[in-house]
Amino acid sequence: MNVNARETGWSPAERVRGMGESVFTEMTELARRTGAVNLGQGVPELDGPRPLLEEVAAAVLAGANQYPPAYGFPALREAVAAHQRRRYGLEYAPQGEVLVTTGATEAIAAALMALCDPGDEVLAFDPCYDAYPAVARFAGARLVPVPLAEENAGGTGGGTGGESGGGTPGFALDLDALRAAVTGRTRVLILNSPHNPTGKVFTAAELAAIAEFCRERDLTVVTDEVYEHLVYDDATHRTIAALPGMRERTLTISSAGKTFNVTGWKVGWVCGPARLVAAVAAAKQFLTYASGTPYQEALARALGGVEEWAGELRRTLRRNRDLLSEGLTRAGLRPYRAEAGYFLQADIRAWGHADGVRFCRELPLRAGVVAIPTSAFLLAPDAPSHLVRFSFCRREKSVVEAVEKLIAAA
Ligand SMILES: Cc1ncc(COP(=O)(O)O)c(C=O)c1O
């Protein structure tokens, strides 16, 4: 249902107007109606690790069914702090500097509510995860796009800092675009690395440049790192909070959903200096207060051994990515570099299309496959729309089936 309801004469509040049915809903419905292979939304087809699922079931039966503390189950906060120390050398106090949230999405929403006054501006690299503009709007803030530069994309682009490349198109930081986007009202920069929808991992040089810019302009950074464990090949995920002078101005957000293949559990967390985390907690307590007690209990134990599980998941996803990338190439749809995460972009122009939305509406009928137009993640209205996003967090057989169909339809 679209949130407009003009025919009844009733109008919803401005902050939700025009939201409602998205291209994601439309494509999921198209997949259902046509029986097409769904490489649209990033919903994993595989389940989380069996021992973790059993721990949750046991926790439920053992009575872990009431509200957890507002900041989250203490053992999970300790496990998150230990994780940040082990992986990034960052110290956070489990009491006061770690807050458990209802998924990363709530953490992002509460962070913007905590940091922005109405009229404030928030910088976000474009394209971006589609929750960012929505939650910025809820906070009364304006999300300002900072376009990522396309590299090797048929003569367009430029940018700085690509670590790999070798002719495969990808995305890079455009420092001039970042400098041009800042104003006296800018309060926050949202960084998402590894990045959805591009699969980009920001390089050390790019992070250093962003950090310097944020220190110079006195910006707070909200960094969304939900794909931190799903990084492939030679790419390395680094957290901006570990750079000089950044811990004190950064809220680092992650979540169990992607790492453990349990996206429906919606357990996320945010780490940062106590004054920032306290402000996020103030907003969060009146959004959900707290949630997911049995999940929190089970994840507190699982997070210590995350590297082993994530290693296995990475191998599965990387293989799927390679199958998809090779298949798209054979189908004539030029794939972009995907160094991390669940998604791969492809250029549709070789199939005679310039508009990703039209292409995605036709694709289920033409090829029996569902994808999402990258324009769904673009903030700038005149941004190019010749890219579509395919998800590879599916069973290998689904990826193979999709690829065969695309090649047959080429
Ligand atoms: C970049 C990014 N951030 C956050 C989320 C949502 O995380 P959660 O399910 O933990 O709210 C997603 C999910 O697709 C995502 O891609």
Image (tube, rainbow, N blue to C red):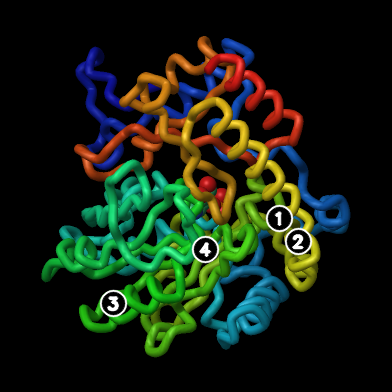
Q: Is mark 1 on a helix, strand or loop?
A: helix
Of the two numbered discs 4 and 1 on the same chain, state the one appearing first in sequence: 4
The amino acid sitting under disc 3 is Cys
- The residue that appears at 68% across and 32% down in the rendered structure is 399
* Residues at circles 4 and 1 in contact by the CB criterion of under 8 Å: no
- Kindly identify which residue carries mark 4: 225
The quadrant in which residue 353 appears is top left
Q: Where is residue 371 in the image (x, y as percent from the top left)?
A: 51, 28
Tell me the CA gap for discs 2 and 1. Answer: 5 Å
Of the two numbered discs 3 and 1 on the same chain, state the one appearing first in sequence: 3
Q: Residue 140 carries which label?
A: none
Crowdedness of circle 3 by 10 Å Cα count: few (<14), some, many (20+)?
Answer: many
Tell me the CA gap for discs 3 and 2. Answer: 33 Å
Q: Residue 214 carries which label?
A: 3
Which dot, 3 or 2, sits closer to the camera?
A: 2
Tell me the CA gap for discs 3 and 1. Answer: 32 Å
Of the two numbered discs 3 and 2 on the same chain, state the one appearing first in sequence: 3
Of the two numbered discs 2 and 4 on the same chain, state the one appearing first in sequence: 4
Crowdedness of circle 2 by 10 Å Cα count: few (<14), some, many (20+)?
Answer: some
Crowdedness of circle 1 by 10 Å Cα count: few (<14), some, many (20+)?
Answer: some
The amino acid sitting under disc 4 is Glu
- Kindly identify which residue carries mark 2: 311
- Kindly identify which residue carries mark 1: 314
Of the two numbered discs 3 and 4 on the same chain, state the one appearing first in sequence: 3
Tell me the CA gap for discs 4 and 1. Answer: 16 Å
Residue 285 visible in image = no
- The residue that appears at 74% across and 53% down in the rendered structure is 315
